[in-house]
Amino acid sequence: MIDLLRLGFFGMRTRPIRAVLSALGIAIGIAAVVAVVGIPASSAAALQEKMSKLGTNLLTAAPGQDFFGQDAKLPETAVPMAKRIGAVSAASATGKISANARKNDLVPASDTLGLQVQAAEQDLLKVLNAEVRAGRWLSSGEKAVVLGGTAASRLGIDKPGVQLWIDGQWFTVVGILGPLPLSPEIDRSVLIGWDAAKEAFGFEGHANTVYVRTTPDQVDNVRTLLGPTLNPEKSNEVKVSRPSEALEAQQLAESSYNALFLGLGGVALLVGGVGVANTMVISVLERRREIGLRRALGATRRQIRWQFLTESVLLSGLGGLVGVIVGIAVTAGYSISQHWPAALPWPALLGGAGSAVLIGAIAGVYPAVRAARQSPTEALA
């Protein structure tokens, strides 16, 4: 075995550039496969970490449309009614306000930056498991606002204390929220206290979105009961959703590209295998005298066959090893850039190295058999 390995490495060392180029195709293919498996796995790990922090037991209810296709309204009693469901641990709401928020009174009214102004109940922060990354939450009745993370970024505000112009009135920014993946609409919102919104803008008190936290094992039951409970007379006008499903669907959509990239990795492996086979066939033709001399010195056909097969496997194996290392580096680098935990599935790593060896064995069969069939007289002629 040791002699075979020495012979295999000797054959590669005699033609280093050709060996490197042949192994490169294998390395690219294996790196692609490892990265394609590792990056989605890292994304999934980050999603699971995020979901465990935010919780999957959040439900939202929003008004749909009535029988005539007009926008419906939730009753003012929607939140108290939601809290009456036994499995509901907490509930709160936001209400849409027809107003535009601008950094100052000189900004054109049409420049809304894609933001919305919403009234927020006092316990919204608790229900959403949200964090105030700067400043504080709203106090009852005060003429102040809290900005979602995206809203603050678009308005160019990075700290509390700034004045904000909302439809002819100045409001003080008292807080900025951290990111809310399960509630992206809050990220894009300027939030005003429920009572302050009624006083400043004549807000009627109808919730636009009701947020409900349930016990984890009762999510489906509460989802069924929520519509009839919030609006008993017109339960068909209530849309109930589970925000965590949107994140899961996004993850599924991203993973749908895996098949494409795995296919590209497979093509690279195929091209690499053909390159290894081509290198070995040329090597057999160029080393006829070496083969003939070894046969004349007593080497059997089997030994010749194993020599070239070993060289082919070593060539592909080294390419596969380099590919695995590159794939790990790409996965780790991308995960770090996205602030994800790097997940490296062992089956992918072992499978990548194993497939490289298998490709080398397959690619080396024909050249090895061809080398073994040469007789000493033909080879030395």
Image (cartoon, rainbow, N blue to C red):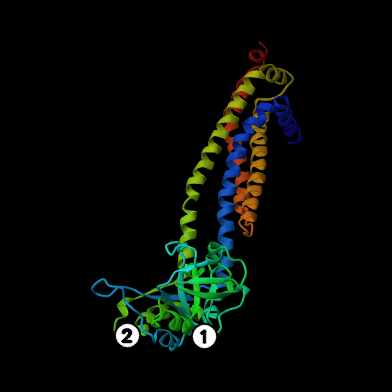
- Would you place residue 77 above or below residue 98 in this image? below
Q: Which-is-in-front pick, marks 1 and 2?
A: 1
Q: Secondary structure at mark 2?
A: loop
Q: Quadrant of residue 116?
A: bottom left
Residue shown at the point (63%, 49%) measured from the top left: 350
Q: Quadrant of residue 265?
A: top right
Q: Is residue 67 left or right of residue 64?
A: left
- x, y percentage for residue 366? 57, 28
- Give the residue pinned by disc 1: 141
Of residue 250 and residue 166, the one placed in the foreground of this image is 166
- Give the residue pinned by disc 2: 232
Q: CA distance from mark 1 to mark 2?
A: 31 Å
- x, y percentage for residue 355? 59, 43
Q: Is residue 10 left or right of residue 32?
A: right
Residue shown at the point (64%, 41%) measured from the top left: 320
Label 2 neighbourhood size at 10 Å, few (<14), some (14-19), many (20+)? some
**Quarter of the image that includes the N terminus:** top right
Amino acid type of disc 1?
Gly
Q: Secondary structure at mark 1?
A: loop
- Would you place residue 11 above or below residue 54 in this image? above
- x, y percentage for residue 102? 49, 67
Is residue 78 at least partly visible in the picture? Answer: yes
* Sooner in the amino-acid sequence: mark 1 or mark 2: 1
Label 1 neighbourhood size at 10 Å, few (<14), some (14-19), many (20+)? some
Q: Quadrant of residue 129?
A: bottom right
Residue shown at the point (55%, 55%) measured from the top left: 40
Amino acid type of disc 2?
Pro
